[in-house]
Image (cartoon, rainbow, N blue to C red):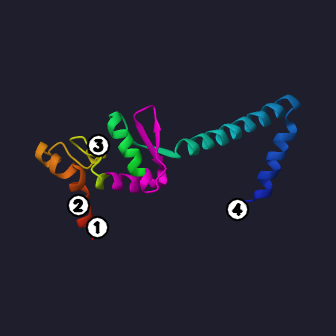
Amino acid sequence: MKFDPKSYWQKALDFWNAQDKKKKIIYVSSAGGVLLAVILGSVALSSSSANVDLYKDLPPAQVSKVLTTLQSVGINANLEDGSRVTVPKKDQAKATMQLALAGFPKVPYGYDLFKGNSSLLSSESDKKTCFCGKRTIGCKLRYVN
């Protein structure tokens, strides 16, 4: 059995010509609605991912220092909702690295704890050693070199 596109095209034309005007309007408007929904959805998804959260719920004293640190290295950081620091998605890794080198965030555990780099078998000592500030960056840089 050979694939013949002309026969399929002819069947589609016969089907279309057999429909009355009301059904044709319904088909065209449905297809247009689906196309519009896909376009609007893709635009909404692409624009919402322009900035990503770097830190949430930071104390006010740290927020200003984090913003100053990021802006001093040329990263466009924004403050949203009073305690949420966001950066452009393309600068997320650079911002995280710069802040870790500067000792941020000043909390007992770093961001890696919640990014899947620890396990249930990690002790509190392991978490403090592996996930705190500059030591995390030092460990990672040793493995990169």
* Inter-mark Cα distance, 1 to 2: 10 Å
**Which picture quadrant has residue 16?**
top right
Mark 4 or mark 2: name the one nearer the start of the chain.
4
The disc placed on residue 43 is none
* Inter-mark Cα distance, 4 to 3: 56 Å
Q: Residues within 10 Å of mark 2 (few under 14, many from 20)?
A: some
Mark 3 or mark 1: name the one nearer the start of the chain.
3
Please name the residue that numbered disc 3 is placed on: 114
Please name the residue that numbered disc 1 is placed on: 144
What type is the residue that disc 4 sits on?
Lys
Mark 1 or mark 2: name the one nearer the start of the chain.
2
Please name the residue that numbered disc 4 is placed on: 2
Q: Residues within 10 Å of mark 4 (few under 14, many from 20)?
A: few
Give the structural element (helix, strand or loop) at label 4.
loop
Q: Which residues are magenta?
A: 71-99
In the displayed image of the protein, which residue is found farthest to the bottom?
145
Residue placed most toward the observer, 65 or 133: 65
**Which label lies toward us, 1 or 2?**
2
What type is the residue that disc 2 sits on?
Gly
What type is the residue that disc 3 sits on?
Phe
Give the structural element (helix, strand or loop) at label 2.
helix
* Inter-mark Cα distance, 3 to 1: 22 Å
Please name the residue that numbered disc 2 is placed on: 138
Query: Where residue 131 sits: x, y (%)?
Result: 22, 49
What type is the residue that disc 1 sits on?
Val
